[in-house]
Amino acid sequence: MISVVVPIYNEEVLILQFHEAITNALEETNEDWEVVYVNDGSRDSSLEILRNLQSSDPHVVVVELSRNWGHMGAISAGLQTARGDATVIMDGDFQDPPEVVPELVEAWKAGAEVVVAVRRSRQERRKLLAKLFPLFYRLLGALSDFPIPLDAGIFGLMNRQAVDSINGMRERNRYLPGLRAWVGYSNAVVFYDRQDRAGGDGKLSFMSRIKYAMDAITSFSYKPLRLCFLLASMSTFAAALLAVSTIFSRNPFHTAGFGVAAAIFFVGSMLLLCLGVMGEYLGRVYDEVRGRPLSIINRVYSQSEMLPVQADSNYEEMKPAGGFGVHVA
Ligand code: UDP
Ligand code: MG
């Protein structure tokens, strides 16, 4: 069976259209399939629309989260719930085109254990973002201690083992394209043209993107920390030069302390910068130590009995205190 995990946050205008498109795409594969829609605390009628879909279509599973947890929290909950031999992850706004899904499935059937969908081109109304994305991927590529495919987002397919490997990870600050590369297995690449959003507005805030970008860099690289050493040696060198030039200079401005002031500012800002870099890592260490789940599932709606896929994962932790509410409808 093929599972498709789709995070949904306030997508009422697109859900039905998306479901029709993904249904057509999955029928093409001649495999059994399910679509796991994760309602990430939508404030519009998305949940009602999804529940109606679920009661009329046995292929639909709806995961209701306890609140809005963000893109990665929603995807993690979907991955914990998906039962397929292969699981596709994609956004529900047509940016990851449903018609590419059969190609991912073909590559899996041909033997790949992980299929990465790589953006050949990108349609994006938001011009600044369109410029920033490729830059980010290049920066990550340069910094990362581990090779991560360029221009690949969450869109792709993983077989059962790869999904279980990711589910079993304790990591809280997740950068999925990186983890998907990190778990290994035989990889294949399918190129696609990323579309513009089919309707509604983008749901991710600029700050959440920055956080995600920082997650990506900090979870795959120590280089920013090493940068502190570089900056420290540069500022030591500059300070030494200033000291020498002040001692030997007859220029009265030097004694007026300009040089000293400049040196203090310079060293101070380098120190603050390094503290900031360390803070980024330290905050994440704190997150990991607290071990809070990435998201909490409130209920799962499905026409068939849903059982936890595996016991040793975060799934256990994701259960609310009152037990895991599976509603068989
Ligand atoms: N999404 C989500 N929770 C959020 C924000 C977004 O589940 O807090 C979903 C959203 O419904 C969409 C996908 O994640 O299916 C990607 O969001 P969006 O299209 O806004 O991101 P972008 O494509 O702009 O990066
Ligand atoms: Mg989108």
Image: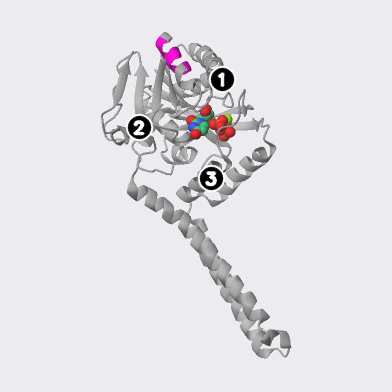
Residue name at image x 58 percent, y 42 percent:
206
Q: Is residue 265 visible?
A: yes
- Label 1 residue SS: loop
Q: Position of residue 97 (x, y in %)?
A: 58, 23
Question: Mark 2: which amino acid?
Answer: Asp
**Number of other residues with Cα within 10 Å of mark 1, as a class: few under 14, some 14 to 19, many 20 or more:** some
Instruction: Name which of mark 2 and mark 3 comes first in the sequence.
Output: 2
C-alpha separation, residue under disc 3 versus residue under disc 1: 27 Å
Q: Position of residue 209 (x, y in %)?
A: 55, 42
Q: Which stretch appears magenta?
A: 49-55
Tell me: residue 217, above or below residue 57. Answer: below
Residue name at image x 40 percent, y 21 percent:
62
Quarter of the rendering containing residue 307: top left
| Mark 2 lies on residue | 164
- Label 2 residue SS: helix
Residue name at image x 33 percent, y 45 percent:
291
Q: Position of residue 133 (x, y in %)?
A: 61, 40
Q: Is residue 14 left or right of residue 262?
A: left
Q: Nearer the viewer, mark 1 or mark 2?
A: 1
Q: Position of residue 228 (x, y in %)?
A: 52, 64
Q: Is residue 117 visible?
A: no
| Whether label 1 touches label 2, CB < 8 Å | no
C-alpha separation, residue under disc 2 versus residue under disc 3: 24 Å
Quarter of the rendering containing residue 270: bottom right
Q: Nearer the viewer, mark 3 or mark 1?
A: 1
Instruction: Name which of mark 3 and mark 1 comes first in the sequence.
Output: 1
Tell me: residue 276, above or below residue 176. Answer: below
Question: Mark 1: which amino acid?
Answer: Leu
Question: Mark 3: which amino acid?
Answer: Ala
- In the image, which disc is placed on residue 213? 3
- In the image, which disc is placed on residue 14? 1
Q: Is residue 266 shown in magenta? A: no
